[in-house]
Image (tube, helix red, strand yellow):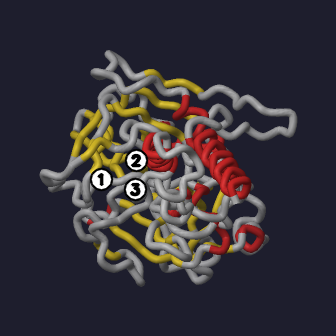
Amino acid sequence: MTLCCPSLPWPAHRTGPSVTAALGWGTVSTTKPVAAVSVAALEVTPQSWPLPPALAPMALLGLLVLLALVGPVGGTCGLRPMASDHSSGGGTSVQPGAWPGIVSIQATWENGTWHMCSGVLLSSQWVLTVAHCFARGGGVSTWEVVIGTTDLTQPGPESKVRHIQRLLVHQHYVAATARNDIALVELDQPVECSDYIQLGCVPDASLRVSELKSCYIAGWDFGSGMVLQESKVHLMDTELCNSSPWYAGAVHLDNLCAGYPQGSIDTCQGDSGGPLVCKDNEADYFWLVGMSSWGRGCERARHPGIYTSTQHFYNWILLQTGLSPAERAGPAPEPVVTSAPEQPLTSSGTLMPMAFPHQILVQFRNLLQEFLQFLKDKKA
């Protein structure tokens, strides 16, 4: 068991541009994963190194360290190590560990502790969920986040319980229209990753979400006996969802529409904040593309589920989690419920990508490659 990456995660390395699209990876302008660039591929050996022999071992060691920093072997998000099969129908109970990123957000009242919403773990101390979950909850000082379980009646030894240290609701959330229905929860203590606890991958704008083919939803519907349910769904065209026989313009630009035209499979009460994930078309990991936000009724024809698009809020998530303090020694006395500040914009109107550490390291590696090639050409 290891501590979940305290910074923002990225998926397992695979070929193709989508791999660099995960939250926290930055905007690396390359179509190949950095980890695929090996010392052998660069033909960097003490014999071929275009430097004095005495300096070659130290230079080689430095390059190895640099490559290790830029491209860690293996991914840190979007993994489902305990999932054997993916659901093909609706309302299927899942096996323990099948959805290792999902969490249950629970409130304690006079008559007990109840599941309120779902969320997804993004790092060792941050959970992504929806804002409307907290609309009628009052103070969250007694709320709990249960991580690493599928059965809320019998969480099991693999599960962890944390309290809410801080709640960040989007500054432009509008309850009446469900615009900007997104929130971040900071846990009072970090959690450790395991086969039952993994991190979700949020895509940036470079991933073409509409082209993802295999998508799934999960949640603890109140009628399911509090055992996590999963279903396979299709991403649907937003214009179709906004047409007059469907939602008649109520779907916003920050939403995704997923389900089936005939209904039958949908998220419902108790599923709010539940993940909409889509398998990468070329690799065996999953993108967290949406969070269950709203709908009209349950499983109705021409009224599929509406989800908050995580890609739409990529910069907002990056900004808020980047502002979080370093790992804390213990819980704060009282959670802080705040409205998140505005995003700083560049002259082009978009948030500047986070340049350090990965982007700078990749740029340095590219410059180093060019320099080595220059020396080799000069020697030849």
Residue 294 point in image, percent of width and height: 56, 57
Which residue in the rendered view is the most extreme toward the top? Answer: 333
Side of 121 where 240 appears, left or right: right
Q: Which residue is mark 3?
A: 270
Q: Which residue is mark 1?
A: 197
Side of 45 where 94 appears, left or right: left
Helix, strand or loop at mark 3: loop
Residue 155 point in image, percent of width and height: 18, 53
Q: Looking at this view, is 272 or 80 the one in front? A: 80
What amino acid does circle 1 point to?
A: Ile
Residue 254 point in image, percent of width and height: 69, 53
Q: Label 1 to label 3, Cα distance in Å?
A: 21 Å
Instruction: State yes or no: discs 1 and 2 in contact (Cβ < 8 Å).
Output: yes
Q: Quadrant of residue 150?
A: bottom left
The answer to whether 203 is drawn above or below residue 32 in the figure is above
How packed is label 1: few (under 14 Cα within 10 Å), some, or many (20 or more)? many
Q: Looking at this view, is 282 or 303 the one in front? A: 282
